Amino acid sequence: MLRTARSSRKAISILPRSFYERAPDIVARALLGKLVVREMEGESLIGRIVEVEAYFGKEDPAAHSYVGRTMRNAVLFGPPGFAYVYFIYGMYYCLNVSCEPDGEAGGVLIRALEPIAGLATMAKLRKLPPNPKPQMLTSGPGRLCQALDITRAAHNDLDVTSPTSLLRFERDDYRVSGIVVTPRIGIRQAAELPARFLIEGNKFVSRGG
DNA sequence: GGAGCGATGTCCT
DNA sequence: GGACATCGCTCCG
């Protein structure tokens, strides 16, 4: 086997729970450029976060937590740094992470990733032909859950700060150059609030890059 | 490339 | 019973 010149490995570390123990819009901004790591059997599927939305607690009519604590949204009221996965429109899952201290509701919706590793597996999971345009893999909240095989049954309430978790959020030395703020997408309540954050000029945002 | 729309399950009222 | 933090397909330009 050829010995290749291997550059120094990028420093990767898990985001600590304190990272999430803040207001959702602060966490949302900070999550841009971070990595979502999904451990499959023998393979890591990795994507970089390029688009997110903040959902606030009981004051936000568009948030699932607006109605108060229920069975469905309990994770949002729990401690920070846990995955909140819900099923929408009869077909798709959406991935969020809980924010704010235990007892306070809040979360960030992951809307789009730039695929980094495991693209062939992602294409299979998305039921796309081989070598699709990479934008088709993870640009959109429903798409990225399909590409990473994220479901409510398997991943809701998982601790994304645990080194042994099947779903983790990590950081490397990537730097975000610029951030664009817009209203949130696909909601009717509080639709004017600027709470969607995306990396400026990135080709993998779900729309309006 | 953009608007319109149907497919589909789960939760809350 | 209705709303829903979507997607991918039509049609039309």
Image: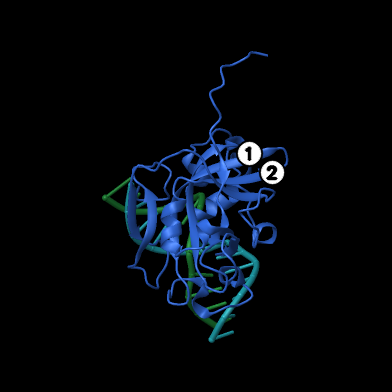
Chain colours: A blue, B cyan, C green
Residue found at x 50% / y 68%:
A106
- What residue is disc 1 on? A121
Residue C4 location, x and y as percent? 48, 69
Is residue A50 shown left or right of residue A89?
left
Q: Residue at x 55, y 60 (%)?
A: A97
Mark in front: 2 vs 1: 2
Mark found first going from the N terminus, 2 or 1: 2
**Amino acid type assigned to the residue bearing label 1 in the image:** Thr
Q: Quadrant of the N terminus of chain A?
A: top right
Query: Which residue is pictured at 43% across the width and 43% down the height?
Result: A204
Q: Secondary structure at mark 1?
A: helix
Above or below: residue A5 compared with residue A72: above
**Residue nearest the observer in this picture, C9 or A129:** A129
Question: The residue under label 2 is which amino acid type?
Answer: Met
| A50 with respect to A145 (left or right) | left
Kindly identify which residue carries mark 2: A40
Q: Nearer the viewer, residue A22 or A151?
A: A22
Vertical comparison of A48 with A182: above or below: above
In the rendered structure, the answer to whether residue A21 lies left or right of residue B3 reads right
**Percent from the top left, x then y, of residue A131?**
55, 33
Q: Residues within 10 Å of mark 1 (few under 14, many from 20)?
A: some
Is the Cβ of the residue at disc 2 closer than 8 Å to that at disc 1? yes
Label 2 SS: strand
Residue drawn at point x = 42 percent, y = 59 percent = A26
| Residue A190 image-quadrant placement | bottom left
Query: Hey, which residue is sitting farthest top in the picture?
Result: A2
> In the displayed structure, would residue A163 be above or below residue B6?
above
Query: Residue A54: x percent and y percent?
Result: 44, 62
On what subunit does the disc labeled 1 rest? A
**Residues packed near mark 2 inside 10 Å, few (<14), some (14 to 19) or many (20 plus):** some
In which quarter of the view is residue A96 placed?
bottom right
- Where residue A32 appears, as percent x and y from the top left, is 44, 49
